[in-house]
Image (cartoon, rainbow, N blue to C red):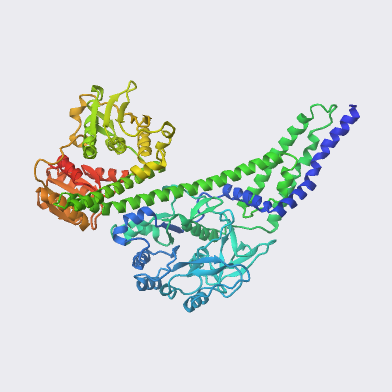
Amino acid sequence: MSFAAALDAQRAWRRLPWLALPAGLLLWALLAALGWQERLDQLLSDTALEATAPAAVPTSQVLRVDIDDASLRLLREPLGEWPYDRHVYTLLMDYLRDCGVRLVVFDIVFAGAREGEAGFAAALRAGPPAVLAAAGLTARPAGVEPERVSDIERQALQRLGLSAEGGTPWGAWTPPSDGLLTPLQGPGSLGLISTPLDADGVLRRVPLVHQVAGQQLPSLGLAAWLRASDQSRWTLEPGTRSSTGRLQAGGRQWPVDALGRAVLRLPAPLAAEHDQPALLRWQRLMQAALGVADDAALRTRLAGKVVFIGSNAFFADEVMTPVGRMTGTQLNAAVFDALEAQALLAQDGWLWWLGQALLLGLALLPVAVRGVVGPHRAVAGWRRWLVAPAALALLSLTLAAGAVAYGLTSLGVLLAPGLALEVLLLGLLLGSAARVLAQRQRERVLERERAVAEAESRAKTELLSQVSHEMRTPMNAVIGMADILARSPLKPDQAHYVEVLRAAAQQAFALINDLLDNARIQSGRMSLNPAPFDLVDLIDLQLELLRPRAQDKQLWLRAFAQRAVGGHVMGDAQRVAQIVSNLVGNALKFTATGGVTVELSRQDDGRVRIDVRDTGVGIDPAQQGRIFEPFAQAHAGVAAHFGGTGLGLSITRNLARLMGGDVSVSSEPGAGSCFTVTLDLPALASGLDEAVSASALVSASPVAPSRCLRLLLCEDNEVNVLVIEAMLGPLGHEVVVAHNGIEGLACLASGQFDLVLMDMQMPELDGVAATRRWREIEQREARARTPIVALTANALDADLRAALEAGCDAHVTKPITLPALLQVLARYGR
């Protein structure tokens, strides 16, 4: 190729960047026709909002009160179950009035009349000024008449709203109850909390004005601003697709779109509670309102503040915004602050047009850098002298465009990149940019899906734990009464019925425990509580508890232990016992003749090895891998013939791995099975056996106490009292009953008891608080220590730790059988 031809080719390459503008126009039109341009603008706008989000709200006059799950549990006794009756809010309003609160905003829809309605209405009249919430139920398309409203609601709409067009329309709404609508006077006393989301589930435009039955109603955040600013009217000039409208009130105006929605510069949500200076715990506020605590600092903090009150006790209250996930109360408080600081973003005006022109000019910069290439005498190596300047241009353009977009966002202008984006990317790295944007979009979707999945997992775990707790109390009565009936003189057919009842109850109890353990493991909440214990004694005890099952089937049940595993080890005795019980019980279930042998040894690596051998049906090699999966069994006929849920082996393997070991199986059909467990249970020094206190050791105990005991039973459930008395009374034990913690402390102060059976959840004073107080009394008055055993339906690890930290000697969960109860008496009764 001649020099002239090479120069002509070079000039042709130098003219290539000029194609960016016409090609960009064509690409922009195509993306707009396909509906992709709006998504792209949303993505970049979200990025700009997230990058320029302020670290905190711009004002200090707002306090948020979140009625959270923890506070609801702690205040269940004085306030009752959620949702609360109106007298709770009457008490709250009286306290906030005394503290000199400027305004109270309820992010709660008080729909339907409830107890205490009249008192709450009187409190609303007495002050401080308050704003109540209503909800829009269904979005109303243009031209569709809304659902009819009652006369009282229509009068309230006319009194609290404005007869004007514009705003986000709703076909139906949920207002406060009629008794609470009456004391509301004037616009700003009622606000709507409903916020329609974009198609991808993100809230980008917050409605400031709503339309219900021909009346304009403010959003909750706008209503709060109107009441705080003593304003009663507003004017809405809806915008169009090409221009921004205006909302005016009290000499201020804010940019809105055609539906009265605004784009806000929301603050970045703070995850940690201690990093949120505007957050106030519901527990602290209500304890002060109830007079439980004289919180002078709280009164000072509340004086002159606008207080937003809502509940994050359910997942539906949360909403995804461009800056992250926020609760409804956070969002409404942020709207109030944004209106006060005028931190709303405009999408028109001279500054908006200037920003768009700057972006387009930056997008055309590659045309200007074509001179970087310069004359070249050869075509060879053209990639080196073209790609390098193009990459440099792309980097400089991206940084410059980002600075313009983010900078103008900080000034209150939200740009729509539009044509500038296509011109910027076309001809440089269009393919790779598309992949990057798709990857970022996928990451955001995955992040949102993961957040939803984690929230669903937490909700399912908490629900399962609550259901398990509530089922244990009636199960205690069923199993206890079945044991009592089994020891009574019965006819043969009656004895058979009782045995069927007891077996079914025990099977249901085992299912509850398995489901609860599986939920803990799946949610990562399973934890260990290591303590010294005698491993051989522990296994002997589990075999003694299972021996009646083996005898009923005429099977042998025996154990062998090497000398190396003698003495005490460090580990979680309860979980080790659960592993042994699961494996031996499983072996007994699948063995018809012969028996089960447990062998205990220590491997060369120091881990304990437990082999459980049976002479049962065996397992096909093809099915051995799936028996450790949750809810899985060797084949479909196993559940029908032998029963069970398939959770036992899965839980056993997870517990073993949690303790630094594992579980394996070797088996042949018809030749029995051998399950091998390895556990990291370090042996304690021989001299430590004597130093460890008896209360910290788990060892075999006598089947029953050696004498009759005088017992104090602290229990508020009459059915549980009946069960315990029926179990222990015929055996000569004296049972004194206290129906709450206060009665229990009085009994302990006036008499001597060999053992206390303490329920954890009781009225007036719960078992944890009662135990803690009694330990303090013992120490102060130099009394002899009285053994206290927590007998409760609370089966979580946190409940165990709370009971032991309060001073209980042990934690036993309901339902409890007579043998287990006698074992507790034998071990802890003094």
Q: Nearer the viewer, residue 224 or 34?
A: 34
**Number of numbered discs on residues:** 0
Q: Where's the C terminus, which quadrant? A: top left
The residue lying at 42 percent from left, 54 percent from top is 279
Q: Please identify the quarter of the rendering in which residue 288 is found.
A: bottom left
Q: Position of residue 413 (x, y in %)?
A: 64, 55
Q: Can you see residue 275?
A: no
Q: Quick check: 486 left or right of 236?
A: left
Q: Please identify the quarter of the rendering in which residue 201 is found.
A: bottom right
Q: Where 50 sits versus 343, above or below?
A: above
Q: Nearer the viewer, residue 345 or 703?
A: 703
Q: Position of residue 88 (x, y in %)?
A: 34, 65
Q: Quick check: 337 left or right of 581?
A: right
The residue lying at 38 percent from left, 38 percent from top is 650
Q: Where 167 sits versus 650, above or below?
A: below
The residue lying at 38 percent from left, 62 percent from top is 83
Q: Can you see residue 214?
A: yes
Q: Where's the N terminus, which quadrant? A: top right
Q: Nearer the viewer, residue 272 or 491?
A: 491
